[in-house]
Image: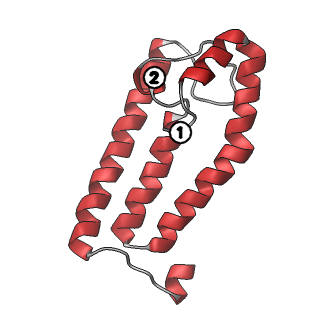
Amino acid sequence: MAEKYYPLPFVAPSVAEVVGSIIVVLSFVLFALVLREFSKFKTSVDHRKATVAIISTGAFKYSRNPIYISMVMLCIGLSFLANSVWGFVSALLASLVVTQFVIKKEEAYLEEKFGKEYVDYRKSVRRWL
């Protein structure tokens, strides 16, 4: 909406297209790799289903939330493709909201379910990057 009334491009159009495309593709690659890890551990991506394992391999070695990273990357990539500062700002704000209202609840659930195993994992791997 802000873009309509106050457009704020932030890079040259040719750069925006290349960078945006790369980030969008990487977001899908990351998501696919994360799905592969979920499959290996026979646990569901669906947050409504019980988690059966703490995954600490693949992208989960570097971030406790690679799915959310892939989503934010997608938003940032699309912001580049639209060459819009507003999209970029929205992606950052969305990541703050997700942290506060989704990730923190998930972490409490995982700590309750897995106890020390999850606490140790949480201490050794960052929330985002």
Per the image, the residue denoted by label 1 is 128
Do tag 1 and tag 2 residues touch (Cβ < 8 Å)?
Answer: no
User: Depth check: 52 or 96 in front?
Assistant: 96
Distance between the alpha carbons at the discs numbered 1 and 2: 11 Å
Per the image, the residue denoted by label 2 is 61
Q: Secondary structure at mark 1?
A: loop
At x 67% / y 18%, what residue is drawn?
119
The amino acid type found where label 1 is placed reads: Trp
In this rendering, the answer to whether 105 lies above or below 96 is above
Identify the image quadrant of residue 21. bottom left
The amino acid type found where label 2 is placed reads: Lys
Residue 48 shown left or right of residue 93 in the figure = right
Question: Residue 62: x, y in percent?
Answer: 45, 28
Question: Residue 45: x, y in percent?
Answer: 57, 28
Question: Residue 9: x, y in percent?
Answer: 38, 79
At x 44% / y 17%, what residue is drawn?
57
Sequence-wise first label, 1 or 2: 2
Q: Secondary structure at mark 2?
A: helix
Judge the density around disc 1: few (<14), some (14-19), many (≥20) Cα neighbours within 10 Å. Answer: some
